[in-house]
Image (cartoon, rainbow, N blue to C red):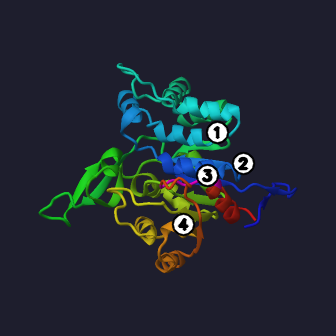
Amino acid sequence: MARSTGPDGDGPRPPRVVALGGGHGLHASLSALRRVTTDVTAVVTVADDGGSSGRLRQELGVLPPGDLRMALAALCGDDEWGHTWSQVLQHRFSSEGELHGHAVGNLLIVALWELLGDSVAGLDWVGQLLGAHGRVLPMSSVPLEIAAEVSGLDPERPDALTTVRGQVACASTSGRVRSVSLIPEAPPASPQAVKAVREADWIVFGPGSWFTSVLPHLLVPDLAHALVTTRARRLVTLNLSPQRGETDDFRPETYLEVLREHAPKLGVDVVLADRGTVDDAAPLRAVTRELGGRLELDDLSHSDGSPRHDAELLAAAFERILVD
């Protein structure tokens, strides 16, 4: 893909990239993307109900700030300012009192929300403070709850489906997640997120918790419509390993099959997978082709052997795909 030209045709501009997800997966994607483009927007799930985020959500009725905080931290630069503020944002208090477990960044974000009365403006102010290389937006303007249909919870009826509610419960279930939905069923999308998707050159799905961080974006009607109809190209970055409960026994192509089940009208231009996690590329390439895309295999995992994406390797792969 060639770089887009500026509004006056006066030379190339960096690609406009929107990254979807939440938690550690989105953190990995953003840590790489900020090395590739100066125009990156994170659209983040708002269904977390555990830990510091869950406590603040329950007490104050706000959007859960944790995944938004992690996205902002990922967009901090590598200089001393960015590194220090990233650490401050991620720092958690350790005490015997009520502050125990709260992340400094969560409290800062919620404080700005209360002062400004605007969740997007509050996030923009935090981004300015951090010198973030991009923007962070919630996918919806209201807090959401995830409901999952899970099999394997009843030992006498292993194929029976049980509804599990809440992101933490869905992510930690001992059964196998078959599908997810949102409560409320048709939540309002963040208008700024919809606008970013419509104006993007590329949309990046994943990596991340497939059912609780990636797929929920496709269950918000206005956002889903924008993702399907945008002129942007779509890149899916696959996970390095299955996640217990959510994606047990998933093959690389299974992620795409589940994506298609939840969004049958969504086309895909490129699927990016770690070469070392794909034993047989033929099935993955076939499903990718059915979705309208091409498969890119690369070395993406961290050298320490952990199932983590290496930011530099992922950035190099992104640059080859997103930028000529």
Number of residue marks: 4
* Residue at the extreme top: 97
The residue carrying mark 1 is 76
The nearer-to-camera label among 2 and 3 is: 3
Asked if 269 appears above or below 64 in the picture, the reply is below
* Residue depicted at 71% across the width and 57% down the height: 15
Going by the numbered disc 3, the residue's amino acid type is Ala
| Distance from Cα at disc 4 to Cα at disc 3 | 14 Å
The residue carrying mark 3 is 311
Q: Decide: marks 2, 3 in contact (CB < 8 A)?
A: no
Question: Relative to residue 305, is residue 167 drawn left or right?
Answer: left
Neighbour tally class for label 3: few under 14, some 14-19, many 20 plus, Cα within 10 Å: many
Q: Which residues are magenta?
A: 307-312
Q: Quadrant of the C terminus?
A: bottom right
Residue 62, picture quadrant: top left
Secondary structure under badge 4? Answer: strand
The residue carrying mark 4 is 273
The residue carrying mark 2 is 38
Going by the numbered disc 2, the residue's amino acid type is Thr
